Amino acid sequence: MSDHQNPRESAGPAKASARPGSDTELDDFICFAVYESNLAFNNLYRSLLGDLGLTYPQYLVMTLLWRRDRRTVREIGDALSLEYNTLTPMIKRLEALGLVSRVRDEQDQRVVNVTLTTEGTALQEKARKIPQCIAEATGLSVPELKDLKARLDTLRSNLRSGGGQE
Amino acid sequence: MSDHQNPRESAGPAKASARPGSDTELDDFICFAVYESNLAFNNLYRSLLGDLGLTYPQYLVMTLLWRRDRRTVREIGDALSLEYNTLTPMIKRLEALGLVSRVRDEQDQRVVNVTLTTEGTALQEKARKIPQCIAEATGLSVPELKDLKARLDTLRSNLRSGGGQE
DNA sequence: CACGATTAAATCGTGCACGAGTAAAATGGA
DNA sequence: TCCATTTTACTCGTGCACGATTTAATCGTG
């Protein structure tokens, strides 16, 4: 009925950055700030990764493999907090692109090992400039980024422990 | 080839929260911290919104309408940074749930006005406790949340201005 | 050895997000 | 007035994310 009823006792008022032009009516939702920041990152990555033919989640998987090759699907899922039903199709797409190969483990036939192909390894060169571009696009200094990351890690840890098995 | 080559001059070292158990190999990516926080929020909202039969993006749309009813699809898209191709099916699902109605504007036949149904308005009562639950699940104080939100707003603004039309 | 329980992975269905393309209404000059 | 342009919305195809279910391999314990 009424026009502006804010649940401000919960998530905080935070009317700081309300510019007249932008419709920031969900200012007091911290989750919305995270949601929007994630969308902004995705869109930035989309333009940067277009040359490589990768999506952002695919880039994360490739980054893991560039750092340490030969991982199981489960290991990748643990690192990215993703389930098999997300990863299996995604890794199959990377396989179709010729970047990774999926082979059953000899010792344990349940396990699928994901390894880089020559082409997948070579792609790392073309991706080397990306972290630098991202860091610059944030417009924040290294200490600021470090601090923000620490706060987000705390937030994420709290959210998982609270929502998971309370 | 080599085992650990970190692009740490760009996105910051940030080896602070590396616990032995959790596989945090993407620590130095600020984007990854945002990505993971967003996933954590989504999963928390999923459990909270299950009773209402809403998804998180649907909840955001409903929240906008609860604050001010009768919005065009464009207004909703501006508020959430979403395109028509995302919103049109989503709002049609809300319509199928009986929560909103979509009617063409009399003056401008291009415009579709989205308004709450009686049922949609009534749903606000059941959703009233959610912001409080979310705020508590973050485990952060109101000043901390306010500060974190301000930093994310800066980050998002920088990302958009840099990646958009440079 | 046998057999229930656990684990790794895959499949299916739903919904969000976006690029590309389409359609129709409204607008703005020449 | 007329027509190109803009605006609003929609459709289609692809990929991510997850709940629910399924399959196959391995483990554990009697």
Image (cartoon, coloured by chain):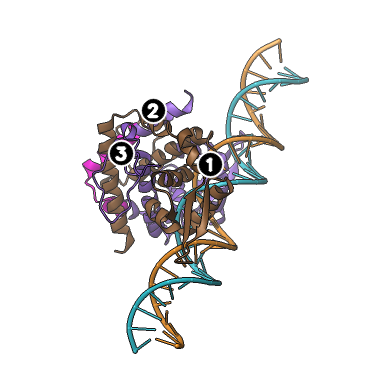
Chain colours: A purple, B brown, C cyan, D orange
Q: Which of the 4 image quarters holds residue A112? A: top right
Q: Is residue A152 magenta?
A: yes
Q: Nearer the viewer, residue A27 or D17?
A: A27
Q: Main secondary structure of the magenta part?
A: helix
Residue A40 visible from this viewpoint: yes
Q: Position of residue A2 (x, y in %)?
A: 37, 42
Asked whether, in this view, residue D26 is left or right of residue A27, the answer is right
Marks 1 and 2 in Cβ contact (< 8 Å): no
**CA gap, disc 2 to disc 3?**
18 Å
* Residue B70, placed above or below residue B30: below
Residue type at the position of mark 2:
Pro
Q: Position of residue A75 (x, y in %)?
A: 49, 36
Residue carrying label 3:
A149
To the question of a shared chain for discs 3 and 1, the answer is no
Residue type at the position of mark 3:
Lys
Residue at 25%, 37% (x, y): give it: B147
- Stretch in magenta: A132-154
Q: Nearer the viewer, residue B67 or B60?
A: B67
Asked whether, in this view, residue D24 is left or right of residue B35, the answer is right
> Badge 1: few (under 14), some or many (20 or more) residues near its Cα, within 10 Å?
few
Q: Nearer the viewer, residue B103 or A147?
A: B103
Q: Position of residue A153 (x, y in %)?
A: 34, 34
* Residue B10, placed above or below residue A146: below
Labels 2, 3: front one? 3
Marks 3 and 1 in Cβ contact (< 8 Å): no
Q: Secondary structure at mark 1?
A: helix
Asked whether, in this view, residue B163 is left or right of residue B93, the answer is left
Residue carrying label 1:
B119
